[in-house]
Image: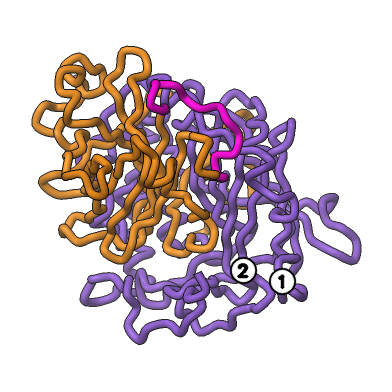
Amino acid sequence: MTDETAPAPAVHPLADRAPTQASQAEISDEIRAIEAEARARVTDGGQPELHPRRNYPPYRSSILRHPTHALVRVDPEEVERVSPAFGHTDVNPLESDLTIQHNAEPLGERITVSGRVLDGEGRPVRHQLVEIWQANAGGRYVHKRDQHPAPLDPNFTGVGRVITGDNGEYSFTTIKPGPYPWRNHLNAWRPAHIHFSLFGTAFTQRLVTQMYFPGDPLFALDPIYQSITDPAARARLVGSYEHELSVPEWSLGYRWDIVLTGPKSTWMESEEAHD
Amino acid sequence: MTDKSVTEQPAPGYVQTPAQTVGPFYGFALPYERGPELVPGHHPHAIRLHGTVTDGAGEPVPDAILEIWQADENGVLSRERGALDHDGFTFTGFGRAAVNLAGHYTFTTVKPGPVGDAAPYIVVTVFARGLIHHLFTRAYFPEDAAAHAGDTVLGAVPAERRQTLVAVADGTPGGAASYRFDVHLQGDAETVFLDFDA
């Protein structure tokens, strides 16, 4: 994996095929039009969409990567109703601290991100795996395909793991990631975020998502965040700053609780209509 | 556009957290040692499950990552902790494989036994940049055609699309049975993806 830090190729291997890049104004117009249509559906009695749309053209890479057929709705069988089991042989407790993985401290704003993982009935998801990854304070990932000309931090890889506790609780110590540019459209910038990967007690509860930081000025401009058309649903991805979680002379505290699907819900009907 | 909602607390109650794309930069985080090897290649009953993930233009998707989850050879679902620790002896039923630059993934595993009345299958989960919310599907085995006729999930799929859920036997490299299960995110052969009523 050491080649991950090799110099980036001159041509981005994942550059989108679109011959011309849209402007932010064009992307923002598309975002607003879709949101208005989604709002009208709710006004007409439809369910708010709790998940992003897989077909969300303002996020250009989704155009060729979303299924065009409706998902086939089925009852999960026993295989899907259980989940892989993780434990303390999988994860060293030190892996929850992303600031101690190298010889010195990473640059940036030291933060903690803590919360609980719950199922759809509010029951804690105990002793399950949570994985995170993120850019450094300058908005750069340790990845050969990230050629944003911001500095790598030799003291920050940006990867952490933890096993949830008896109450579904988790806590990471890290640094606040920076926003970074991407090539979806001209002058496209992702709001600062931390990627999260979660397991529940059933494989159907598997979730990969992103946590954002409150008050980010890039929210309205970002087609990945806005692919969730319901404002209340989007807000569920934003952690809250909680001063009592800050540690004097040390770190700023954010809280973010995560709710997985199930055991029974009805949201899929509204989503299915868009797939 | 002012998004006032982002300053509000999440609504009370337990409303599920939305998904977001895995993005392109999971490389140091999600792949893990022997993640694609649920059993070692020299296991007497090892099979290869492999395939290519393609997009709507028929191009390989070079940054997808797949997970599988399955019963063991006897149809038993592992409750062993240590699903990330593929020690070569404990079958945990879970694997994870990033595709290569040609969009190709490979798992080494065993063919699951049937669980209950269902035909044997492996649950396959697909994540990728550009795929905003992951997709679930199932890989069934071609030699089980008789069991497929009575399978509830296959029965819920339109007949002309059913074959997208059945892997293709493609030889015995190194003595291990190989099954090819391509994932087409779009196109004429678009894979059937499942939405679990869970």
Q: In this view, does B149 lie to the left or right of A117?
A: left
Q: Label 2 vs label 1: CA separation?
A: 9 Å
Position above or below: B62 against A41: below
Q: Taking A257 as reference, is A100 above or below it?
A: below
Amino acid type of the residue that numbered disc 1 sits on in the rendered structure:
His
* Residue bearing the label numbered 2: A157
The answer to which quarter of the image holds residue B193 is top left
Q: Give the range drawn in magenta.
A: B71-85
Judge depth for marks 2 and 1 and give the one in front.
Answer: 1
Q: Which residue is drawn at 63% across and 45% down?
A: A90
Dot 1 falls on which chain? A
The residue where tag 1 is placed is A102
Q: Where is residue A221 in the image (x, y as percent from the top left)?
A: 45, 64
Give, as a three-letter code, the residue at label 2.
Thr
Q: On the image, which quarter does residue B22 sit in?
A: bottom left
Residue plotted at (30% across, 56% down): A62
